[in-house]
Image (spheres, rainbow, N blue to C red):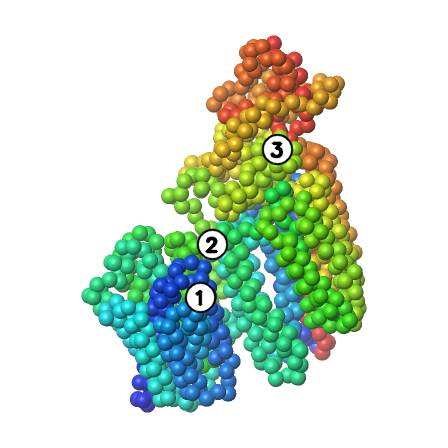
Amino acid sequence: MNGGTKPRTVPVVAAIVAIAATYGYFLLFAEFAFLQLATRELGAGLALCLLLGVLGAGGITGSLLAAGASGLNPRRALAAGFGGCAMAAALATAGGMWLWWAAAGVGVGLGWTTVLLSMRLRASLGTRWLGRGCGLGTGLAYALSNLPPVFEARPGVQAVIALMLAGAGLAAAGFLAADTVERADGPDFSGRGCVGWIAIFLMLVWLDSAGFYVLQHTPGLRDVTWQGPWRLYGNALTHLVGAVLAGWALDARRWGGTILVALLLLGLADILLAGGVGGYAGVPYTLGVSAYSVALVYYPAWGARPWLAGILFAVAGWVGSALGIGMVQDLHALPLWFVALAGTVIAGLLLVRRGELRGTGVLLLVGGFFLAPPARADEPSIARGREVYIAEGCINCHSQYVRRGVTEDVVRWGPARPLAETLAESPPLIGIRRQGPDLTNVGNRRSAEWQRLHFVAPRTLSPGSRMPGYGRLFKDSDSRGADLVAYLDSLGETTLEVRRAQIEAWQPDAAALSHPDSAAEAQRQFGRLCASCHGPSARGDGPLATRLAVRPPDFQHEPWRHLRAGEAAPEVALARLIKFGVPGTAMAGHEYLDDATVVALARYVTLLHR
Amino acid sequence: MSEPTTARAAPTAAGIAARHALGWLVAANAVGVGLAVLLLWPDLNDVLGPLTYGRWVPLHLDWQLYGGCALPLVAVLLQWCLGERPPSGVAQARVAVGLWSLALLLGGVAWLGGGSSGKMFLEWHGWTRPLLPLAMVVLWAVLASHAWRRRGEPDRSGHAGRAAVLLVLLAVPGVLYWSAGRGVYPSVNPDSGGATGTRLLLSTLGIVVIFGLLAEILGLARRRSGPWFWGYAGFSALVGAAIEHGNASHHEAAEILGLATLLGWIPLAWFHFTGGQGVAAARRWWAAAYAWWVLLVVLGLLNFLPGFSERLKFTNAMVGHAHLAMAGLVTSANLAVLQELGAGRRFRRFWLWQIACAVQIAALAFLGWGELGHGAELFYSAPWTQAIYGLRLVAGLGMLGASVAWWCDARGATNEGVAT
């Protein structure tokens, strides 16, 4: 990197004014007043989302157009950009359909101006003073936007201030140095280096916009961080000091250090916000934002590579802002796991920059594995259990959809649910194949006790089952197993009565009743399917019997528990119990057995009963 | 005296994407084989700790879709937009495709860690949700910058085509991000719980359009067939739009008739793809892709018909149908595409792949056909179901072997050079 010569005063002042004007326009108008004007006009629905989409698409387009606009007079092109920004601000105050044109104009104008300005900065500020110039310009923009008369002004007034800022930028553009500077080389500007820096800034902008959205949209938080003249003056001063210090650090070639400090400050602010103590987040947030914002101006300015600047501002600036705001709107919170993820990615990329590739790979992979969105402790157990169901991929073997027109489905898996009810879930868990039973009504087909035993040792209860064991979910400190059982237990709770009526009405096929039995085959089936609880001789002494809350009956010495006295057709009633189980007990049904097998088992059990 | 050395041929941008594509195909097939093993011997899940069967499935599905199936198309786009010897193009392609692969790798790690959306083929959730869209944005920027750089070249129709395709592709990252959201779910056939006829028609039409564009870009399309091909595509889209009314049943005549319009693509695809002078090595792959295409359309329609749908939905037959689409049709077509691009030597193991794929599909279809009446036997691992799963494992091993051979072929094409 060059030492650089002392720059001339006029281009330096012009560059600082132009940076302050561009950043100020963005902070005060694009990110704030325009949003308020649009919300007032369109409400907070889909139209507003579309308008913001137009703004973002305009920003990306403007950035990329500026990157490809070689051959234009740089100062005139920049002045045109400021002019476009001014016109867009004026259009926005007109409201109505003009708002849409204004959104496109603000986006394209800002995207265009930002990229072209960054190409003029190294020539104007020189390499020795580039950081401090960027820092002062950025800090002034933040300070101005936070001054109480500006911050608390009505959106229309803020639009006029933005228009004046664009005018100041337009005037300053004519005094920027027109010299051509060489494109910077070195690892930070190789293909890999560029991608790394774009990713770093993307994560920082993402963290920033998510944090800012929470600060500004959480009742109470805004009052303690961004309200009142003294707090606003304090924020303005903190921004200015933070930005100038960051510029100084960048001039001292502390690129990685500046980013790391910004990350720590922003991360701390976001952790405080996510942890519910956001009142303390103001100072670290303002310092962190100032630091990385200066670096975001400095890096492309140092590189003097139009495509790098274009892609950086398109991806990190526009996409990053959209992702941050979208994420918080989507999740209604700033998740801690995301802060950890962003920290991991940025730290990893800074390690890559230092050449520590292997460590970064391990960091990313290990971090990725443990960064599954954690279950929220404040959610009900059933909701947490649903997340466990999704995380373990149960959907890959189990459906949750009973086809009302398919007799086998309804008999085996219970009543169908209304489609609207299924589709209202987020997401619907219909599934595509049944490697195991359908679970739509599993709560009224299997008791929680049975589920627990089955999860721990599936093949003990269901011989030959292809299901993995999930005993690990039931370890002492792990609530996932209990949550999963609670979720499954809740499935079908609204259809229990219909299911009972279905069971009562069920009759085995006439052919099955008249089918000659093979006692040996029935005995084999009993040994395979029933003996684990009932014991090989139906004495209630199977290996699982002691683990059940209610010990299975000793068929040889006890009366039937679930057959009514004087049952007209005990064989059919027993077959019904074998096929559908006894809801609310550990006695599970064998719904997928054919009628002949069920009847044969019923006859065999009758033989065993004394 | 020194031994002759082999100079490494410089890789092309398309070649880089091809190697990544085949690498992901191998990875996805390896996971598939692992899944087949776990179905046969479920006790092995205990050895894997938390990484049980259900956590591996998204890796098999998504690596296949976004890696093995999508990256060959990326290779075509890179070749088409970057042109011959693009300045910095290879390095940029390496970065863009590398980011794509990084997204798939991190996605896989997250799914193994339990971070899934619960939507098949769209498992991107939480921090992984923007990864692939971001990689797509970077790829798009590379494609667009080179398309812009070449604006002065004397090929007006090419510029217009690239601009139009890039404009459409600009929407893809956003659509992928949006559609992975848990709150987004397509219309459902209320009588089957599966896709509606309209959805099947329009998604198949999407594949047809992609293949149609491929034919144009690779110069394989018959000039006279263009109006017929694109006209019928427009007609099919209109049919789809006309019959679209949300959650419609497969018992509705409009749904069946709408889906039946896909039969028209059987002759049209043949007519459209047999016009150009393709690479000789690609021809058998195109022929295989066409054979799978005919089967896919006919069986897809049959599976949708009342009676068949009731019998086959939620069974292994549908898994077989998915293999028919992805392993049969798309993989064969992608291998043809990679041959056309010169991304590998003559890919070997043609018959191994085709036969193994056919065995896999037939085994799953046979099992699926019997499931409704013999559910207990599948759930309790009756010997005949184990035998079919065993056959499927053998077929899977054959497919894995073939894909490893292709990956070596693609590497070999890069490593081959001039003896000096």
**Subunit under mark 2:** B
Measured in 3D between alpha carbons, the distance from the residue under mark 2 to the one under mark 3, in whole angstroms, is 36 Å
Q: Residue at label 3?
A: A410
Residue B135 in the image, given as x and y percentages of width and height? 53, 65
> Tag 3's secondary structure?
helix
Residue drawn at x 69%, y 37% is B371
Q: Residues within 10 Å of mark 1 (few under 14, many from 20)?
A: many
Q: Secondary structure at mark 2?
A: helix
Q: Which residue is mark 2?
A: B126
Front one among A302 and B210: B210
Q: Is residue B33 above or below residue A69?
A: above
Which residue corresponds to mark 1? Answer: A51
Chain containing the residue with disc 3: A
Specify whether A75 is left or right of B182: left
Who comes first in sequence, dot 3 or dot 1? 1
Indicate which label's residue lies in the foreground, 3 or 1: 1
Which chain does the residue under circle 1 lie in?
A
Residues tagged by mark 3 and mark 1 found on one chain of the structure:
yes
| Relative vertical location of residue A580 with respect to residue A32 in this rendering, above or below | above
Residue located 67% across and 57% down the image: B239
Contact between marks 1 and 2 (CB within 8 A): the answer is no
Separation of marks 1 and 2 at Cα, in angstroms = 25 Å
- Which quadrant would residue A534 be assigned to in this image? top right
B133 lies above or below A473: below
Quick one: A228 or A128, which is closer to the camera? A228
Q: Is residue B84 above or below residue B22?
A: below
Q: Residues within 10 Å of mark 3 (few under 14, many from 20)?
A: some
User: Mark 1: which amino acid?
Assistant: Leu
In front: A214, or A267? A214
Residue at 47 percent across and 54 percent down: it is: B126
